[in-house]
Image: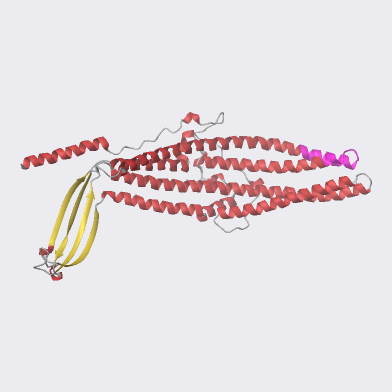
Amino acid sequence: MKKFFNLKLILAGFTLISLQSCFVAKEYTQPEVVEEEKFRTDNIDLDSLNMATISWRELFTDPILQQHIETGLQNNIDIRVALQQIIAAEAYVKQGKAGYLPTLDGNATFTHQELSENSQFGSFFSSVNQYEISSGLSWEADIWGKIRSQKRAFEAGYLQSVAAHQAVKTRLIAEIASTYYQLLALDEQIKITQETVDTREKSLDVTQALKESGNLTEVGVKQTEAQYYTARAILIDLKNEERLLENTFSILLGEAPQQIDRTELDEQEITTELNIGVPIQLLRNRPDVMAAEYELMNAFELTNVARSNFYPSLTLSATGGLQALEAQDLFSMNSLFATIVGGLAQPILNGRRIRTEYEVSKAEQEQARLRFREAILTASKEVSDALYTYQATTEKIEVKQKEYEAYELATEYSEELLVNGLANYLEVLTARENALNSSLDLTNARFNQLRSIVDLYEALGGGWQ
């Protein structure tokens, strides 16, 4: 009989091992979410060195901008929130590591019971007191990899929070740099417009003198006056935009709105070569892409957990302690008691809860896979956009520079001709207006070139290393 019992235990153990080999938790493998050759770069040169691996301190050489970035990384609210999310995720990782350990709890109870005289023991005892101090130990065997999958899910969640923090850091550095360059561009435009206002104020005196000498009509004077006020209105708008942008910049730094220290647009020079690396490096460099994949890993492991709920769970539990009817006898050797229980539980009917959880987890896993694919596609688009924008703005600067020089010469020639009575005053007004607009556009083109470099750096995942 004893041999037969031992044989049953062996067969039961063999059956569990066989089932485990069939239904053990699956291993995660990175999905093919996008083909590398689909990245659109046309004839733009690629390089094995990715500019995203360069520190932001090497890319942005302006010492004042470097100081602003340092301040933002320390004080920005989004950065500090992301750090707290990492701390929370780290707590879950510690919980996952403890999943293999048994649970232990302690109890101390006192029970007083008044017995009925008609009950089984009421004729012997009118009341019963019971004192008990005990502890319980419980442990679940990880037959199907449920605990291991839960641990991996927590680890993926932690890595996702770290990558999310890195993504916030990358985005913040890019926003600070772009806003800083925009402020420099506004300073340059304010300077140009202020000079235009001063020039037009002098031109107003000249046209007044030409009118008095009979070489110009009152219409010409009023047109010059209107251009003067137009330039002043542009100046007001630019100064207002500057103040609003300074307030935005202050919030990026995590500080109250204030005046921002800065240099000049002409001093900005980015000497780093624009090497984007091979497209697959986006997976390693962009923190938002990494976060999306960690989200997928988390969903994958939680699907493993949901699948394991279909199969039996093996638990071992033990309870022991001291139990006595009298307080003075509680710590006696005769008061010791112990219980050991081994159990195998198989869910049968539970209102479809387990299947629902599994189906939901599968759907959430597919959602995470799609978000991962979207992150890859978005990354490729942003890299392509930044490269084309940089090329376009570089070409535009050359064209706008020639346009501005042409308008400047046209303005000088027309004014000379006007003084000598050889030109129509409308030509002078048109030349002046075109020269101002061209100068402002040239400044915008220079800013857009700097911003496209920042955008490319962010699109490649630079800044967080």
Nearer to us in this view, 151 or 386: 151
Residue 322 drawn at (x, y percent): 15, 63
299 is higher (above) or lower (below) than 110: above
> Could you tell me which residue is drawn at 62 percent across and 40 percent down?
449
367 is higher (above) or lower (below) than 246: above
> Could you tell me which residue is drawn at 42 percent across and 51 percent down?
86
Residue 258 drawn at (x, y percent): 61, 58
The answer to whether one can see residue 199 in this image is no
Residue 445 drawn at (x, y percent): 66, 40
Q: Is residue 438 left or right of residue 331?
A: right
- Give the main secondary structure of the magenta stretch: helix
Q: Is residue 426 magenta?
A: yes
The range drawn in magenta is: 406-428
**In the picture, which quadrant includes the N terminus?**
top left
The answer to whether one can see residue 126 in this image is yes
Residue 14 drawn at (x, y percent): 17, 37
Nearer to us in this view, 74 or 348: 348
In the image, farthest residue toward the left: 1
Report the coloring of the rendering. Answer: secondary structure
Nearer to us in this view, 317 or 268: 317
Q: Is residue 451 magenta?
A: no
> How many dots with numbers?
0
> Could you tell me which residue is drawn at 58 percent across and 41 percent down?
453
